[in-house]
Image (cartoon, rainbow, N blue to C red):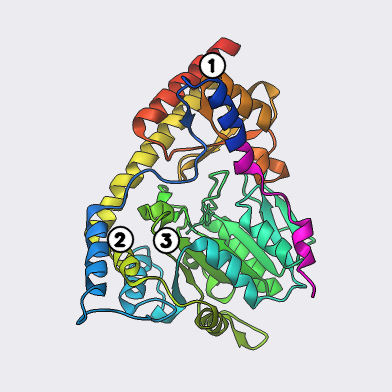
Amino acid sequence: MKLNEAFRSLPPNYLFADISKRVGEYQAKNPQAELIRMGIGDVTRPLGPSVVEAFLQGAREQGDPQRFHGYGPEQGYGFLRQAIRGYYASFGVSLAEEDIFVSDGAKSDVGNILDLFGKDNTVLIPDPVYPVYQDTNCMDSRRIVFLNATWENSFLPMPPQEEKADLIYLCSPNNPTGAAYTREQLKEWVDFANRQGAVILFDAAYEAFIQQAEIPRSIFEIEGAETCAIEFCSLSKTAGFTGTRCGYTVVPAALVRDGMSLRQMWLRRQTTKFNGVSYPVQRAAAAVFSPQGQRECRENLKVYQDNARLISQTLAGLGIPFAGGLNSPYLWMRCPFGMDSWTFFQELLTGANLVGTPGSGFGKNGESYLRLTSFNTKEATAEAMRRLRAWMGSRR
Ligand code: PLP
């Protein structure tokens, strides 16, 4: 018997455990301290009322012998795939229903998609980025080449001159930097991938936060993407589904390599290893795309966007360099006074009772940065910014 030895060389996954440990220790010694968590990647706003109603309606059907649903189509019910199709059409992207695969969230799909690709491919992954891309490829022992996302390139790395790529991960708007690619930049990536026969794995989990019209919400807004890209999206941050679980992946019919259709392969993979998302969740998800559902989502998103604006204004007022916040719930701030990520994390915790996420946990280029999120309440965010200003003032 042989185990997957690649697990031995997986990068340690200590970031959030380390944060909890340090926060727990501090709170134990200072029980009266009221900590504000500005590092959380989870939403705080609940599902919209019309979404909850659809969810309940779906659950009621499950208790009614006339309307009960057993196994559904592995790739999702037609009503939800049509709703997603309509959503893409609203920003000018035309998809076939068969291109859309519903799942329990983007994380599973991002990991599972690797079933389609050989293990001797070379993978390009931005640094820093959502750690799942690196970890899932390490589990398969694929060769990874990191793309430096730095202040100098506005955290948006472009195709490398000399590297031959097979798989390319792009996350826009990005977690953790909040940076988002323009149309022209994505066109360069699409042309590069088509030239090389590579496949772009495009993570659009934060597309709903885009406020600038010139920033594409989908890779399929770019000409040529249908022959080189797969897109992952999620209702987690868009509609508060982090605990409800629903996402979708788009694999266009025109994406073919070595005579094999990737859409056909993904269908085969999903029908073999996945039995679909629960019926009430799919009903709730479809309600997200209704006009009322969209209004409710926009109200919640506005809370986060307003928070992000307040954080941006505070950082700008303090003269702290940062990225993100405009098309993203994430703000990526340079640690002040030349501190490294963990030193600043600890200073903020003890000096201002604020919890951020050390940037070094997202890759080597994250060192000396800290990620703040706009997912807290309006009141907590305002208080956090007051504390940050006071702490900066006390250090100067
Ligand atoms: N992709 C990115 C970039 C994320 O930041 C996250 C969650 O934080 C996900 C995917 C996972 O989304 P889901 O909740 O749909 O699994």
Is residue 36 found left or right of 159 in the rendered image? left
Q: Secondary structure at mark 1?
A: helix
Tag 3: Cα neighbours inside 10 Å, few (<14), some, or many (≥20)? some
Comes first in the chain, label 1 or label 3? 3
Q: Nearer the viewer, residue 233 or 312?
A: 233
* Residue to which mark 2 is pinned: 288
Write down the residue under mark 3.
245
Give, as a three-letter code, the residue at label 2: Val
Can residue 45 be seen in the rendering of this structure? yes
Q: Are marks 1 and 3 in contact (CB under 8 Å)?
A: no
The reply to whether residue 218 is in sight is: no
Is 69 situated left or right of 158 in this image? left
Question: Which residue is identified by label 1?
Answer: 391
Residue at 42% over, 55% down: 236
Residue 359, by quadrant, is: top right
Label 2 and label 1: CA atoms lie apart by 41 Å
Question: Is residue 3 inside the magenta stretch?
Answer: yes
Asked if the beta carbon under badge 3 is closer than 8 A to the nearest atom of ligand 1, the reply is yes
Q: Which amino acid lies under the numbered mark 3 shown in the image of this protein?
A: Arg
Magenta stretch in the rendered image: 1-19
